[in-house]
Structure formats: structure tokens, C-alpha cells
Image (cartoon, helix red, strand yellow):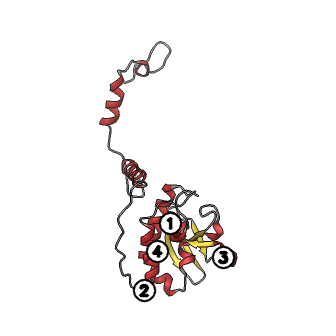
Amino acid sequence: MLEEGRDGRDSSIDSVHTPGELTTWLQEGEPSAPSPWGFTPDERRERLDRLRQGAERVQPALEVPILPGVPPDWAAGVYKLQIMPAPCGIDPFRWERFRYDALRLLHEQGAELHAAGWEALDLFGLNAVAPDRRPDGMGVAWLMRERVVTAITQEAVSLTAYDGAVLRAARLGRQARNEALLAWELRHGLA
């Protein structure tokens, strides 16, 4: 039961707490609830810390698997992305998301996309000058952002978000194709 003070407010709010009391209460609280994406805030913080620390050191090369129905140059390029730092001007956290989505796209739908006639630039391309700001030059992997591929045709790929919103990603146009590069060919480091 709440105790009311002279002015009708909860008197427990006005009580004096020792400096360590509040932090002890926070530490003894329930563990963090998992997010709908499968990891807790603590795990996310740890991943971000690893990302910050890993930016300075060189990671070992990954072995490129042979994926049935997927062109070897797609697999080699996506696996090259996994060890590349973020290009100049791209947020490292957004780059980390892109690398994960590109790997997921390659493994889950790579063979089906290749059979439908999609090219690497349509899937993994980014604008050479402003990769994160020019949507006309963004490939399907950049547009995924945790979305799930729900339909593939020769003209477009449907990406569905967790809330049911559908994004239709079309092939790159002629002008965008002239200005785009494969993500693993972008300049890295300082300009």
C-alpha cells in the first residue's frame, strides 16, 4: 500500500536513496527480454562493441562454399564483403546489416534469383558516389533490411517486413546501372 505525504503524493518517491541502492535494484531486475529479431539488448550492445573493435583489425579470409545454382563470383563477392570494412561515408552499423542481408540473400534465394535471370549488380549493387543515398542504384540486398523475400519474378523481388508491409524491388535502370558498382568493388577507407 502506498503511503501518502502531506501534499497527497506518494511519499516513497521522496525518500532518500543511497547511491548504490538504485543500481543494485537495476542489476537485480529481470533479465532483458529478447527482441522480436532474436537477440537481447545486451547481445546487441556486445555485437556493436565487437563491430567497433573489429574495425581496426584485419579479419581472416573466409572459405567460400560452393552453392548449387549460384554463380561462384556471387559467392566470392558476398564472402569478400564479410571481411571488408564499411566504405567511406556508410554507417558501420548499416554496413553490418547489409553484409548479413547479402549473405542471407545469397544462401536462401541465390539459386532461384540466378535461374530467374537476375544479375549481381541488381542484387548486390550500390551507387558508386553515394551508395547509401541513391535508391535508384541500390540492389535488393541493401533494400532487405531484415525483410524476407516472398516472391521472385524476372522483373522484381517482393520483400515483406515483419509488420506485413511489402516492398517491391525492381532491377536497376539503365542510368543507375551506369552509376552503380558491386558492393565489394566500392572504395574503402578515407576519401
Q: Earlier in the sequence, mark 4 or mark 2?
A: 2
Return the residue found at the far top: 6
Q: Nearer the viewer, residue 38 or 123?
A: 123
Give the residue drawn at x 45%, y 72%.
78
Residue 131 x/y as whole percent: 60, 64
The 10 Å Cα crowd at callout 1, few under 14, some 14 to 19, many 20 or more, is some
Residue 90 x/y as whole percent: 55, 58
Lateral position of residue 65 relative to residue 92, left or right: left
* Residue linked to disc 1: 147
The residue type indicated by label 1 comes to: Arg
Q: Split into 4 quadrants, where in the image is the N terminus?
A: top left
Q: Quadrant of residue 156?
A: bottom right
* Residue linked to disc 4: 77
Q: Which mark is residue 134?
A: none
* Residue linked to disc 3: 178
In the rendered view, tell whether residue 119 sits above or below residue 27.
below
Q: Quadrant of residue 123?
A: bottom right
C-alpha gap between disc 2 and disc 3: 27 Å
C-alpha gap between disc 4 and disc 2: 16 Å
Q: Earlier in the sequence, mark 1 or mark 3?
A: 1
* Residue linked to disc 2: 69
Give the residue drawn at x 46%, y 80%.
73
Q: Nearer the viewer, residue 138 or 181?
A: 181
The residue type indicated by label 2 comes to: Gly
Q: Nearer the viewer, mark 4 or mark 1?
A: 4
Give the residue drawn at x 43%, y 55%.
55
C-alpha gap between disc 2 and disc 1: 23 Å
